[in-house]
Image (tube, helix red, strand yellow):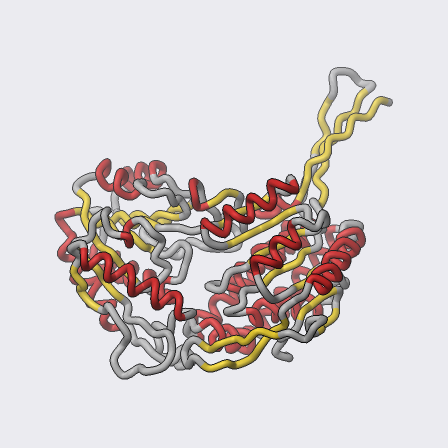
């Protein structure tokens, strides 16, 4: 497989029209490893025209043919897991094993939507009399603009590409500058699966300029964003001006409730290992940990023990548990959150800075904070880094009040062996998703998304294709 590092427009790879490029930096070494084009407005015009043509052709293709094409993409991605994972690790920094896991989940999404392409159902309704026939059908919404973040570039791109082309839409994807080639590798997979020209397009460059240009073009009919709350608000304003529907999967600040009847030792290990997956750069990361008072010391001790055993280092080595952060901005933000917490009374149980013996790269120790309170920024701002703040609650109502005291509502977690507690806590957590006794909740067959400032709309599951269709009602008079 070639390492794709160009624009993918109308089925062709090309440089930017003015040949401008932007560097890609390996976060483990701080070295430039490649570059990608900076798309000009002329390139974007070409892309928009291709997507408009591609949609008008692809929407006429039958569902069985679209299904077979999606299945082929899944097969290609699985065949290339090792090659694409190496690119992902080099440009994003997550350990190679995690990168391979992400690629496996990416293939699953294309597989899932291969089936959903054939299950876009309408219905026939009896009218008031036998002279009328009422019919409801769902049709592809049109060209889509999909904006992808850097933390799970392959998976989150697939969440947009797969349902869009399953529904009969075309799509223009904007990969993140931190990890563009991973997403471009999916364009290559689509190309090799013989997805027609113009159906899948990808442009790299300045995110703010590209998003505004695409959304304001008059061609785009649907927007899907995975990103931060501030970026989401800006995109929504652009969509409002054009009356374009949008799906928003935005930030999270996921609470964990560990009850005294839980398997405390197991819960602590699951939480510690899950918290520092991808160095905490996960939108559904366990980022506020509330433990019932009677077991707080036991949980914290075990959590710290597991955290201290995590091996930090070269993400390409099999023994590495924790690689670097994705960029210097995350190092600075993580440092600031810890400093603020300590200044307000928190204690650092482990971690807190750059690992000893590592001089290069955006590395940071997995950090556990104790004695935290709501006045600290880490309890209100999404940390998106390797910080685990631990505090206590006294009963179910107290725990839920603390867990729900946030503007975010993406995911929440409950650890208990009591069925009543599990149901009540799951139902009353103000989140779009809940994990009970586990943190691994993302899967192709289930809807993914949040409430409150964490956004709206769902990706994955049967719900994930709905946003890429419009409902048409037809009334026949015989």
Which residue is at the far right? Answer: 478
In the rendered image, which quarter is residue 304 located in?
A: bottom left
- Quadrant for the N terminus in the image: bottom right
Furthest residue in direction top, as rendered: 129
From the top left corner, tell me how far across and down residue 197 is, in percent.
Answer: 76, 63
Vertical relation: 38 (above or below) 423: below
Residue 361 falls in which quadrant of the image?
bottom left
On the picture, is 3 further left or further right than 279?
right
| Image location of residue 285, percent across then percent down | 36, 56
Q: Nearer the viewer, residue 416 or 307?
A: 307
Residue occupying image coordinates x 68% and y 46% = 221
Q: Quadrant of residue 69?
A: bottom right
What is the tally of numbered marks visible in this picture? 0
> In the depicted view, which residue is nearer to us: 412 or 478?
412
Please say if 149 is above or below 234.
below
Q: Nearer the viewer, residue 180 or 165?
A: 180
Q: Which residue is at 50% across, 49% downward?
A: 232
Whether residue 375 can be seen here: yes
Tell me, yes or no, if residue 65 can be seen here: no
- Is residue 256 found left or right of 30 in the rendered image? left
Residue under the point 22% across and 47% down: 259
Tell me where residue 350 appears, x and y as whole percent: 20, 67
């Amino acid at each position: 497989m070639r390492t794709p590092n160009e624009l993918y427009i109308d089925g062709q790879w090309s440089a930017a029209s003015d040949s401008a490029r932007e560097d890609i930096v390996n976060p483990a070494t701080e070295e430039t490893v490649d570059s990608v084009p900076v798309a000009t407005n002329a390139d974007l015009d070409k892309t928009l025209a291709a997507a408009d043509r591609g949609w008008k052709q692809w929407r006429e293709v039958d569902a069985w043919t679209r299904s077979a094409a999606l299945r082929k993409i899944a097969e290609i991605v699985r065949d290339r897991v090792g090659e694409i994972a190496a690119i992902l690790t080099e440009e994003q920094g997550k350990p190679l094993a995690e990168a391979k896991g992400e690629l496996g989940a990416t293939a699953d999404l294309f597989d899932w939507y291969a089936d959903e392409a054939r299950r876009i159902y309408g219905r026939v309704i009896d009218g008031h009399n036998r002279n009328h026939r009422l019919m409801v059908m769902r049709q592809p919404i049109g060209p889509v603009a999909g904006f992808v973040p850097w933390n799970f570039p392959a998976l989150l791109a697939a969440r947009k590409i797969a349902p869009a082309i399953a529904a009969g839409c075309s799509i223009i994807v904007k990969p993140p500058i931190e990890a563009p080639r991973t997403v471009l590798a999916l364009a290559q997979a689509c190309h090799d699966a013989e997805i027609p020209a113009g159906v899948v397009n990808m442009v790299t460059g300045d995110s703010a300029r590209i998003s505004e240009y695409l959304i304001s073009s008059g061609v785009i009919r649907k927007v899907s964003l995975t990103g931060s709350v501030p970026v989401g608000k800006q995109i929504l304003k652009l969509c409002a001006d054009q009356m374009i529907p949008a799906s928003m999967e935005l930030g999270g600040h996921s609470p964990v409730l560990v009850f005294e009847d839980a398997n405390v030792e197991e819960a602590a290990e699951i939480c510690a290992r899950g918290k520092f997956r991808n160095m905490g750069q996960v939108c559904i990361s366990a980022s506020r940990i509330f433990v019932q008072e009677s077991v707080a010391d036991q949980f914290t001790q075990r959590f710290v023990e597991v955290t201290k055993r995590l091996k930090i280092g070269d993400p390409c080595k099999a023994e590495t548990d924790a690689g670097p952060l994705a960029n210097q901005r995350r190092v600075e933000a993580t440092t600031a959150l810890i400093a603020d917490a300590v200044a307000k009374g928190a204690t650092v149980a482990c971690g807190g800075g750059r690992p000893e013996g590592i001089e290069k790269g955006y590395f940071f120790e997995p950090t556990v904070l104790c004695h935290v309170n709501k006045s600290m920024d880490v309890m209100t701002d999404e940390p998106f880094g390797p910080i685990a703040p631990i505090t206590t609650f006294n009963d179910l109502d107290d725990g839920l009040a603390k867990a729900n005291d946030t503007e975010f509502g993406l995911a929440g977690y409950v650890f208990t062996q009591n069925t009543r507690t599990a149901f009540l806590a799951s139902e009353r957590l103000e989140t779009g998703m809940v994990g009970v006794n586990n943190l691994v909740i993302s899967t192709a067959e289930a809807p993914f998304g949040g409430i409150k400032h964490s956004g709206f709309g769902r990706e994955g599951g049967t719900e994930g294709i709905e946003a890429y269709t419009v409902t048409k009602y037809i009334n026949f008079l015989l």
